[in-house]
Amino acid sequence: MVNIPKTRRTYCKGKTCKKHTPHKVTQYKKGKDSIFAQGKRRYDRKQSGYGGQTKPVFHKKAKTTKKVVLRLECTVCKYKMQLSLKRCKHFELGGEKKTKGAALQFVSTIAIAACLPTRSDVCVFALIVSGLCGGYRRACFLSSLCILSPHMICNA
């Protein structure tokens, strides 16, 4: 997954700037096709009337992703330029940054059982991880030693 910040300080090629300035980042989107373009007018004329489909329709699609194109706009002179990235399945603009030491993403539910009443010095709890591991749900059980009195919740 590619995560790009919404602002980027990069070189501006505009006539007034010609230096590094902050740029606003957006994702490029294809505009609406013009119905008056010469190719479209020719195609519509050929398609009209009897005779069915006149031009070949492409079916052998090979690529599963598209290249992401960023549209950078200088906040000083409003000069716009495009920057293409590599292919990726998931693209995010201005998402939250990953932090070091943060909890794992795939952990969705954590169930911590109360300490066993049989032994006061040993606290056994289960950490249930409901994440997809190779297509199957896996529950990982973790036991830990906690110096606690019986019937206390262990949050180690």
Image (cartoon, rainbow, N blue to C red):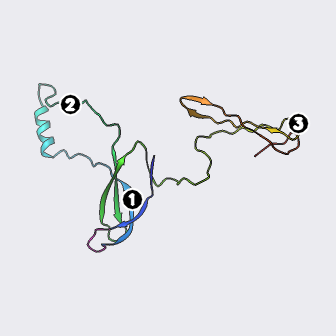
* Marks 1 and 3, the one that precedes in the sequence: 1
SS at mark 3 in the image: loop
Residue 2: % across, % down: 44, 49
Magenta stretch contains residue 13: yes
Residue 105: % across, % down: 58, 44
Residue type for callout 2: Val
Judged from this view, the residue extending furthest toward the front is: 145
SS at mark 1 in the image: strand
Q: Residue at x 41, y 42 (%)?
A: 89
Mark 3 neighbour class, 10 Å CA radius: few under 14, some 14 to 19, many 20 or more: few
Residue type for callout 3: Arg
Magenta stretch contains residue 15: yes
Closer to the eye: label 2 or 3: 3
Dots 1, 2 in contact, CB < 8 A: no
Which numbered disc covers residue 94?
none
Which numbered disc covers residue 57?
2
Q: Residue at x 75, y 39 (%)?
A: 112
Closer to the eye: label 1 or 3: 3
Dots 2, 3 in contact, CB < 8 A: no
Residue 32: % across, % down: 26, 47
| Residue that badge 1 annotates | 25
Picture quadrant where residue 53 is located: top left
| Residue that badge 3 annotates | 119
Residue in front for this viewpoint, 18 or 51: 18
The residue range painted magenta reads 12-17
Residue in front for this viewpoint, 76 or 62: 62
Q: Residue at x 66, y 38 (%)?
A: 109
From mark 1 to mark 3, how far is it between C-alphas? 59 Å
Residue type for callout 1: Val
* Marks 2 and 3, the one that precedes in the sequence: 2
